[in-house]
Amino acid sequence: LSEKKAALLDVVMFKRFTQNEISSQTQVKSSVGRGIRTNILDQYPGFEDIVDEILPKKDSMVLAKCTDHVQLLIVHKEPIFFQYRDGPWYPSLRLVHRYPEAFASSTWRTDAGAIRFVLGGANIMCPGFTHTDGDYSNEIPVDAPVIVNAAGKHCAMCVGQVKMAKSEMATSGKGIAVDNLHFLNDGLWQLQKID
């Protein structure tokens, strides 16, 4: 299991992702679609008010299988969530920017000094959150998805996976706190529509 988690950083990073890395696309059966909706609602409680708008029951959802066990959930040719193996569903940044309130309970904030590193694909270190401009007050368990904002900015800059518990962050003050999986201007961000 730890080997799988260690590989997550190298695999899910969309830094050089292109549409050529999609090996197949399959329309989702309605029963599978209901399961995906349920999983997403369990992960993101604030998503309940807009789930019918984002994941309509009547419209078709497509699962695109990509290299390295990554799946994209596509609605209306737009990738809106991604998943590694059978792990949690991570929202795309375009979806987070459109509906920030739906992901408010899954959001942490770093200081402004972390911005250039995060936008280069680096993981977010603990001092970025423990700084006076940082905020990690939302209860997000280890290995769960997290949306990361920066102080002074109103849009999220990355979607990641929590690697360090809040209590450990407060006491140690160093180390990787969040694995950066999807960030502004990476390959998934640039892939606005999938044919």
Image: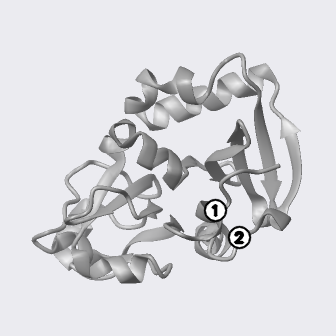
Left or right? Give the position of 46 relative to 79: left
- Residue 165 figure quarter: bottom left
- Per the rendering, the mark at residue 33 is none
Q: CA distance from mark 1 to mark 2?
A: 6 Å
Quadrant of residue 35 within the rendered picture: top right
Read off the residue under disc 1. 188
Residue 47 image point, x, y percent = 44, 31
- Counting from the top left corner in percent of width and height, residue 90 is at 54, 50
Give, as a three-letter code, the residue at label 1. Leu
Indicate which disc, 1 or 2, sits on the residue closer to the N terminus. 2
**Residue at (67, 45) in percent of width and height:** 78
Q: Secondary structure at mark 1?
A: helix
Q: Are the residues at dot 1 and dot 2 in contact (C-beta closer than 8 Å)?
A: yes
The residue at which mark 2 appears reads as 17
Residue drawn at (57%, 33%) of the image: 39
Q: Which kind of residue does numbered mark 2 sit on?
A: Phe
